[in-house]
Image (tube, grey):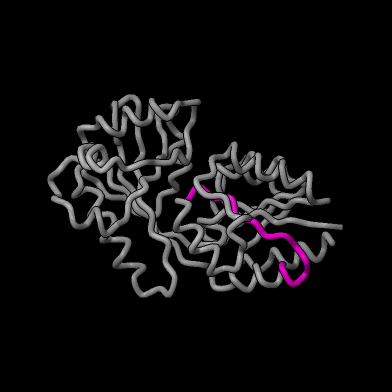
Amino acid sequence: MTTAVVFDSAGTLLRTYRVLKDVTDGTVHENVETITLTASCKERALVLLYVHSRDIIDEEPTRLLSEYLREKNINFGISCTCKAVTADYIRNLLYNDTHATIGDLQGCIRTVWETCKKETVVALNSGVMLNGNLGGIEYVITAGGRPFSRARETIQDLQTRGIGTYIASGDRTKKLMRMADYLGVPQDNTHGVATPAIKEQVVEDLKREYDTVVMVGDGINDLRAMKKADFAILSLQQNADKPEPLMKAADFTITSVHQVVDIIDRLQ
């Protein structure tokens, strides 16, 4: 029997530290579940910015973030939305925002970097949460992720057993590829900026190639892929407080990523 395991990244393979700043009132929040926050308002959209953190740090903090994004022609990826939206709709909200400054995002980047800079491998990503009701940016966000202690060992043990290993994540592709290289997941098997629909499609495509496909996730954006998979594993390693639909969809729950290996052995 051939088997493939698809992993989400943040919260599943990577322990993530996340900082959000609400640009409407200036409050800063740590370790908020951005997918859950996005899902709580149908007008919200979680968007990744394809920009290097050092470039943001070097800019004038009082400058509008939207002005910088327009001038540098910074592209973006739509990570999660509650309703169907077009890229033009997102671009209009993002590039015409009048709320967020470069300094807002600089603060998030510095806070995350101070926490994660001693790690051997760090994936640092920044983005924004748009809100159609505001006509622009509601939150600026930076997240830093480091692999869970046995993440690389888990990938190696699965591959030793002949199991196909894949990543489908909402994280920025370039940095996700570097993390995949560290973990040992082939780049051809790594799918970045993956929306819930794309994750579901990855699982569906793999079911044509493998007898069994297992999805390992930790957030509501993994739900569609978990339901599509033959078996669903829900990770509680970073956060054990999960929405009821995720708990119902899970065939197995884990508190350590390496438990995936034991589950696959049982399924085999």
248 relative position to 172: left or right: right
Stretch of the chain drawn in magenta: 158-171
Where residue 26 sits, quadrant-wise, is top left
Q: Does the stretch in magenta take in 17?
A: no
**Quadrant for the N terminus in the image:** bottom right
Depth order, front residue of 138/58? 58
- Is 67 positioned to the left or the right of 157 in the image? left
**Residue at the location (35% across, 26% down)?**
132
Relative to 95, 177 lies left or right: right
- Which residue sits at x=32%, y=49%? 20
Where does residue 18 sit, x and y in percent of width and height? 38, 55
Q: Could you tell me residue 64's position as x and y percent? A: 18, 40
Residue 11 picture location, percent across and down: 52, 57
Depicted 258 relative to depicted 96: above or below: below
- Give above or below for 198 relative to 257: above
Q: Position of residue 153 (x, y in %)?
A: 63, 73
